[in-house]
């Protein structure tokens, strides 16, 4: 355990001591549950349940899902596979509702591990391969290293050792880059396990013996228990090939005992079963049938608590229930999508109708405006023509006005001349008429006196004056 890890654990404990009922406290509880997962199962369960209770209280769905997964992982290590799957599927259902793809991937991986422990490697591979795709999409490198390690382990059990080693190499490469000593150590143990399958027990033991020091640094009792149990198996297999068997038997018993101690400290049924199974094999090889029987009996009790028909059926029911619920959810989602599609179609049709009506209104309005425009244009054209006519008439009137003014001026001038002429005529006529009047009066008087000579002279004078006046008038006309 590094100093930094201790500080982190202490800081998380401080968060919990604040006794706040909030999301940060839920997160701290779940992190502590994971922290104790490979050290103290009971503590891990305690913090996981505390996180679940608080998440439900504050209605924090993501926290509820993560808490179920925390509890599920403790049940997996304890060998309570039915309970672990029940938790994982509950978490998965919430993850799917929240569309939390990364958490879905984590639960797939956890479900895959349970199937592996139950011996269904093909199903384990199926779930973990789904996890790989999700982790790649989310660029979750740390998780990718872990799932590669698990897939390598599955291929080892399928006797596809070359494929397994490829995955272990990928795991170690990523783990070194991200400084994940836990995953690197686990992958190293799996490589040693591969060597055992190849019957290279000595080389396997050399690698296994490098692991405890690394495991203690990260305080991982699960890796310690598995490693010691595997060392015991390796020594047992070496003993069968050696003449001096007792030394190897003793080493096998020694490491099995250490493995069992770590498994008991963890309270892990699966690891205890693994250690007791190793002890049974060693005692049997030593012909110590009494102790072999005792170990076998303990192994069977623990193993039966892990695997029995009822639990197998219960697990199958959990998965069937999840699949049915998932199918039902898919159907409901499809129905919702269908209803949504219908609403969208109706909405679309309504929009189209509105657009068409709007278009028609715009079209009618445009035609009306166009007609108004044409009428206005025609009116403007007529008005323009009228204006032109008016201008022409105005110009003609102006010309006529000028002409009239000119004529008026000439008339005035002529009138003045006429007046002057008439004045002259009047003057010229005045004297003759005065003469005629005067002589007529004299003729009247002489006629009364019968003075004919004078009358004759007056008559001649009147004749001459009248003749001159007539000529004057004739000239004027």
Image (cartoon, helix red, strand yellow):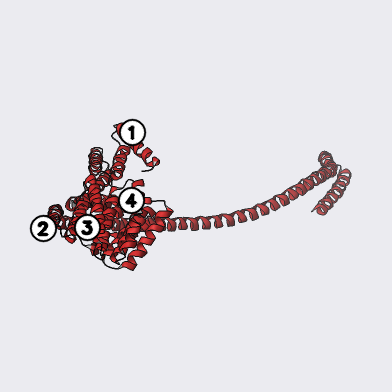
Under circle 4, the secondary element is helix
Q: What is the distance, in whole Å, between disc 2 and disc 4 at their CAs?
A: 36 Å
Depth check, mark 3 against mark 1: the one in front is 3
Under circle 3, the secondary element is helix
Q: Which circle marks residue 212 in the picture?
A: 4
Determine crowd level at label 3: few under 14, some 14-19, many 20+ residues with C-alpha closer than 10 A.
some
Q: What is the distance, in whole Å, between disc 4 and disc 1 at their CAs?
A: 31 Å
Q: What is the distance, in whole Å, between disc 3 and disc 2 at their CAs?
A: 15 Å
Sequence-wise, the earlier of marks 2 and 4 is 4
Residue at x 23% of width, y 49% of height = 263
Residue at x 24% of width, y 39% of height = 50
Depth check, mark 4 against mark 3: the one in front is 4
For residue 267, say whether it is visible.
yes
Residue tagged by mark 1?
A: 14
Q: Position of residue 315 (x, y in %)?
A: 16, 56
Residue tagged by mark 2?
A: 309
Q: Position of residue 353 (x, y in %)?
A: 33, 57
Q: Nearer the viewer, residue 331 or 396?
A: 331
Q: Which circle marks residue 117 in the picture?
A: 3
């Amino acid at each position: 355990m590094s100093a930094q890890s201790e500080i982190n654990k202490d800081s998380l404990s401080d968060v919990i001591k604040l006794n706040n009922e909030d999301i940060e406290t839920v997160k701290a509880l779940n992190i502590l549950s994971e922290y104790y997962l490979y050290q103290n199962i009971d503590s891990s369960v305690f913090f996981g349940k505390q996180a679940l209770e608080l998440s439900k209280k504050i209605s924090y769905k993501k926290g509820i899902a993560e808490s179920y997964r925390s509890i599920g992982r403790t049940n997996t290590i304890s060998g309570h596979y039915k309970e672990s799957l029940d938790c994982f599927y509950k978490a998965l259902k919430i993850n799917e509702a929240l569309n939390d793809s990364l958490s879905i991937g984590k639960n797939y991986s956890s479900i895959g591990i349970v199937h592996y422990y139950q011996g269904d490697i093909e199903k384990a591979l199926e779930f973990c391969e789904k996890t790989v795709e999700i982790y790649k999409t989310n660029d979750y490198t740390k998780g990718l290293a872990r799932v590669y390690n698990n897939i390598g382990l599955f291929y080892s059990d399928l006797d596809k050792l070359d494929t397994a080693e490829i995955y272990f190499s990928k795991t170690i490469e990523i783990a070194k880059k991200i400084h994940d000593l836990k995953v690197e150590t686990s992958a190293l143990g799996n490589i040693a396990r591969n060597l055992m399958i190849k019957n290279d027990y000595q080389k396997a033991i050399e690698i296994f013996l490098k692991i405890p020091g690394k495991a203690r640094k990260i305080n991982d009792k699960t890796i310690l228990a598995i490693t010691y149990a595997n060392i015991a198996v390796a020594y047992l297999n070496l003993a069968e090939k050696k003449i001096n068997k007792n030394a190897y038997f003793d080493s096998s018993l020694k490491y099995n005992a250490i493995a069992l101690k770590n498994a008991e400290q963890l309270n892990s049924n699966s690891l205890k079963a693994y250690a007791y199974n190793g002890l049974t094999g060693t005692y049997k090889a030593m012909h110590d049938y009494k102790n072999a029987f005792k170990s076998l009996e303990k192994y069977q009790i623990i193993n039966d608590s892990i695997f029995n028909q009822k639990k197998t059926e219960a697990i199958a029911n959990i998965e069937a229930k999840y699949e049915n619920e998932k199918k039902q959810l898919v159907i409901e989602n499809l129905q919702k999508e269908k209803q949504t599609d219908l609403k969208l179609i109706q909405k679309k049709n309504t929009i189209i109708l509105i657009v068409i009506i709007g278009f028609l209104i715009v079209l009618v309005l445009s035609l009306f405006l166009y007609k108004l425009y044409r009428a206005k244009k025609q009116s403007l054209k007529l008005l323009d023509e009228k204006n032109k006519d008016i201008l022409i008439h105005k110009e003609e009137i102006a010309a006529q006005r000028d002409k009239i003014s000119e004529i008026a001026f000439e008339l005035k001038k002529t009138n003045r001349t006429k007046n002057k002429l008439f004045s002259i005529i009047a003057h010229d006529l005045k004297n003759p008429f005065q003469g005629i009047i005067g002589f007529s009066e004299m003729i009247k008087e002489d006629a009364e006196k019968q003075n004919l000579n004078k009358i004759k002279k007056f008559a001649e004078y009147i004749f001459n004056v009248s003749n001159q006046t007539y000529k004057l008038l004739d000239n004027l006309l």
